[in-house]
Amino acid sequence: MATARVSDAFELSRPEVAVFVSGVASMGLEILAGRMIAPQFGSSIYTWGSIIGVFLAALSYGYHRGGKQAAERATNGRMARVFLLTAAYVAGLIFLGDLLLRASTGFPLPSRFASLPAITLLFGPPTYLLGYVSPYAAELSAKEGLGEASGHVYALGTIGSIVGAFATTFVLVPWLDIEYIAFVFGALSLLTALVLVLPEFERDDAVAGGFVALLLVAAVGSGVAGYSVEGRVVYETQTPYQELQVVDSGDTRTLYLDGQRHSAMDLSDPNRHVFDYTRYFHLPLLLTDDVDRVLFVGGGGFTGPKRFANDYDVTVDVAEIDPEVIDAAKRYFDVEESERLNIYNRGGRQFLRETNRTYDLIVLDAYRKDKVPFELTTEEFMRLASSRLDDDGVLFANVISAPSGPASEFYRAEYKTIERVFPRVYSFPTAGGGVVQNIEVVATKDDSEVTEAELLARNDRRDIGIDLTEEIRNYRRSAPPTDDVPVLRDDRAPVDRLLDPMVGQRYVLQEADEVNESSAGGTEANESTAGETDANESASASLAATPLSTPTWTPARARPSA
């Protein structure tokens, strides 16, 4: 008798199966929404709040409409149609999702609400349809009494949501592309529809099911064509943290994270700086005399770490939280670990807490335009970083923001925060004007100021393998105004609010010219523009009579040219 009771407890009726699957599908689609929306609108708190709000609203409306109709219309066949329509809509998402996302960016809404139309259009209808399932199942339940039936349905739906959340987060997203994840939920809905109509399987059911199955197969087949508007997709995957793509366009291979260009490599010259901001990584060599060990927080395509390990007699450690980024860098960006280059699959803050090493240079390259790990921005983190720097160590932060105007709030807050910890802070915007761009913030533990003239002189005298004249001339002499922005702290770091003014603004990512660089082989770039020649001559002339307070740097740590 006891065995029979246990068996009955785990035996679900067809309506109960439907409720469980609706929970799995609705929560899985919610997590999938975050992955689909992020490349276009970012993954800020506003985006996730909008996703949760739209899903709750759609489910509530589905519950309401389904509840009003359940007494007269609730049947297994009608629930099967709900799942068929859901599967068909998911096929449409695979076919047209990217197009609909791009089309929905034109709504004149404040930036923090910009993702609402896209989320509503893409995920509102299937979530609304799934909302019908619970009241229909409660009406068809074999439980005695309305309370018992409702409680049983809620419990099954919630258990399904838990399964959907964990399965999507820990299994589907790490292993499958977006198209295939959507296909899984479409196929699950289709199979549930078939279960609901069995064994009374009619010809119309077979035709409808076959048509939807064909849609799903055709959709997923078209969704992995291997080309994008940016070029040929060499590799793509969903990582635990973001969407990752490796795209080739001509001789340039680019790493895209959540749809944004993050790193690039010249296939004919893998050590060349393709993006201009990575040239600034060498600036700290003009601000300190002794660089033996360097830490990069954030790997990406490993442009900086590769160049430092290749060109200088230094040990480079890289803390990269995403294992898929590390794997892609090794497979597609010529990254090899060695005695000079060590890669650690750790978050930057975790790594700094756990290590007992000290560094001459720490480079923060983990910020993005719309997605910044707040724990790497706060005063507490900066104090931790400072404690891991030698007395003459340098902190370098690659901040994406505007140097002035409404979109400058994050840069100014970060500057103010770093200034609380480090006695001297320098800023180098990489593009003209007040546009959103890479702003290189460099901080030293040495209170004495190094002027632009002194930097130009050191650049002229020190053999660091790259001419930084143009980069130095972007030196911003005055500190930005910070009275209206907060100091970022662990207990209050409103990074999403500070990033919000940048939503919808164009991010200007400068590409570097092949000028005045030398690689490990000692090759010099063949071209130099007239403007740069004039600038070098002018700098030398103006500095000829200027006494330097710092001795000329001897490149004892630089590799000799071959």
Image (cartoon, helix red, strand yellow):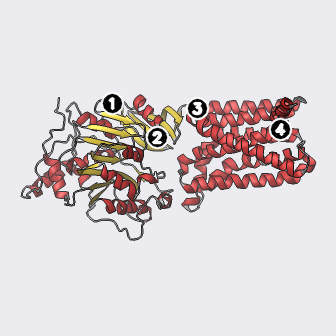
Of circles 3 and 4, the one toward us is 4
- Helix, strand or loop under label 3: loop
- Helix, strand or loop under label 4: helix
Q: Position of residue 168 (x, y in %)?
A: 63, 39
Give the side of residue 109 with respect to residue 57, left or right.
left
**Residue 246 in view of the camera:** no
| Position above or below: 561 against 430 | above
- Front in this rendered view, residue 256 or 291: 291
- Give the spatial CA distance, label 3 vs label 2: 16 Å
| Position above or below: 358 against 544 | above
Q: Amino acid at mark 4?
A: Ala
Q: Amino acid at mark 1?
A: Ser
Circle 2/circle 4 CB separation < 8 Å: no
Give the residue number, with chain letter if any, for mark 3: 224
Task: Report the disc number at residue 132.
Answer: none
Task: Report the disc number at residue 256.
Answer: 2
Q: Position of residue 53 (x, y in %)?
A: 66, 56
Ranked by sequence position, the earlier of labels 2 and 4 is 4
Callout 3 crowding tier (Cα within 10 Å): few <14, some 14–19, many ≥20? some
